[in-house]
Image (cartoon, rainbow, N blue to C red):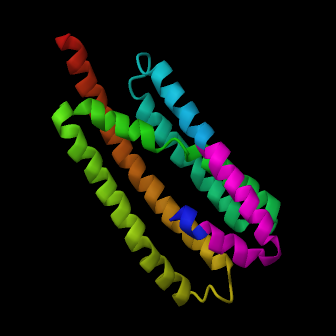
Amino acid sequence: MISAYAPVFFIRMWPEMKSTYALLNAIALTFLGFSSALLGGMVCDKYEKKIPMIKAKVLIGGNILAIPLIALSCWTTNFYVAMAAFAAMIFACGSYYAPAVTMMQNSVPPEDAGIIVSTLHLFTYSATTISPLIFSRVAKYFNAATNPKVYGLTILLAATIGYLGSNFFYWKGGKQYCKIMEEKRLKE
């Protein structure tokens, strides 16, 4: 939802910065998102033996860092501060996908990995499909057309609920992952 509605927020808040936003957003998504994914993977691989919960902690840490960055992006009146906060948010939580999928794949028999990852995609794409309906209703109800800050606050609310809610499951999943990996290690 963030990547779908951040452009609406930025372009409505700073219409004169449309081209600059497009360029900076593309750079942030491409370079910071990619760098975050690589760095997150390297951190998880390097420290997994010392810190079995590292994958879950990377996910949770990125989510926790993202919330104040989104808040700063939505509350500031300065375009460049908002873009810097948004770019930092992309870097902070850009590695969300690989550690979660790796935990799932490593926790189940190989013949079940496909259905597990497919189920993740089902829920992700369902949420991606439903969220615009909810977002547009909220934006319309609070008259975002005349007050574009509503778009940012709606993004912040949805991201806060999503990130904090998923952190609970990342923690539980991380604990279960540690237990399964320990059982596998003892069998070897």
Relative to the observer, which residue lies in front, 30 or 76? 30
Coordinates of residue 108 in the picture (x, y in percent) = 21, 33
Residue 14 covered by magenta stretch: yes
Residue sitting at x 63%, y 51%: 29
Relative to the observer, which residue lies in front, 60 or 97? 97
Q: Quadrant of residue 186?
A: top left
Relative to the observer, which residue lies in front, 141 or 26? 26
Residue 123 covered by magenta stretch: no
Residue sitting at x 50%, y 31%: 41
Coordinates of residue 6 in the picture (x, y in percent) = 62, 67
Coordinates of residue 7 in the picture (x, y in percent) = 64, 69
In the figure, 98 relative to 80: above or below?
A: above
* Start-end of magenta stretch: 6-33
Assign the magenta stretch its main secondary structure: helix
Relative to the observer, which residue lies in front, 47 or 113? 113
Q: Is residue 22 left or right of residue 52?
A: right
Q: Quadrant of residue 32?
A: top right
Residue sitting at x 63%, y 74%: 8
The residue at the far top in this view is 188
Coordinates of residue 139 in the picture (x, y in percent) = 55, 83
Q: Quadrant of residue 39?
A: top right
Residue sitting at x 68%, y 80%: 148
In the figure, 125 relative to 183: above or below?
A: below
In the figure, 161 relative to 146: above or below?
A: above
Number of marks: 0
The C terminus is located in which quarter? top left
